[in-house]
Amino acid sequence: MTVRIRLRRIGKNAKKNPHFRIAVYQSTTNRDGKSIDELGFYNPLTGLVKMDTEKLASWIKKGAQVSEIVKNLAKKEKKAAK
């Protein structure tokens, strides 16, 4: 089975205050299902991204597929770290 790195929506009032966790899932798991590992979080209202890039690289080496949004967030995290 394929492993994917994607976002999981969380937050007390999800419509008005969205927060996302960056997590690793089996490809057949639904959006809010149980994750294998959590790599960080993203708050779109403030633009805050915190991600464990070493874990991300490790999962990619193991063959995990990364969603487009997580790819863009990883690039944003790299620029912020410089």
Image (cartoon, rainbow, N blue to C red):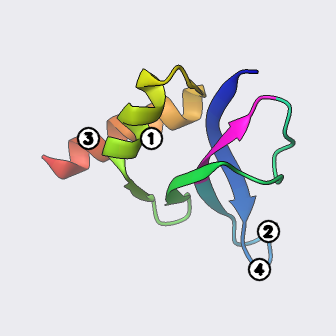
- Identify the main secondary structure in magenta: strand
Label of residue 81 in the image: none
Q: Residues within 10 Å of mark 1 (few under 14, many from 20)?
A: some
State the SS at label 4. Answer: loop
Q: Position of residue 68 (x, y in %)?
A: 57, 26
Q: Dots 2 and 4: beta carbons under 8 Å? A: yes
Q: Residue at x 84, y 39 (%)?
A: 29
Q: Residue at x 71, y 21 (%)?
A: 2
Answer with mark 4 or mark 1, whichever residue precedes in sequence: 4
* Residue 20 is a magenta residue: no
Q: Position of residue 30 (x, y in %)?
A: 87, 42
Q: Give the Cα distance between marks 2 and 4.
A: 6 Å
Q: Residues within 10 Å of mark 2 (few under 14, many from 20)?
A: few
Instruction: Using residue 24 as the reference point, say whether residue 33 is left or right of it.
Output: right
Dot 4 corresponds to which residue?
Answer: 12
Dot 3 corresponds to which residue?
Answer: 78
Q: Give the Cα distance between marks 1 and 3.
A: 9 Å
Query: Residue 58 falls in which quadrant of the image?
Result: top left
Q: Residue at x 82, y 66 (%)?
A: 15
Dot 1 corresponds to which residue?
Answer: 73
> The disc labelled 3 sits on which kind of residue?
Lys
Q: Magenta region: which residues?
A: 22-27
Residue positioned most to the bottom: 12
Residue situated in front as seen by the camera: 66 or 36: 36
State the SS at label 2. Answer: loop
Residue positioned most to the left: 82
Answer with mark 3 or mark 2, whichever residue precedes in sequence: 2
Dot 2 corresponds to which residue?
Answer: 14
Q: Give the Cα distance between marks 3 and 2.
A: 27 Å
Instruction: Using residue 70 as the reference point, say whether residue 1 is left or right of it.
Output: right
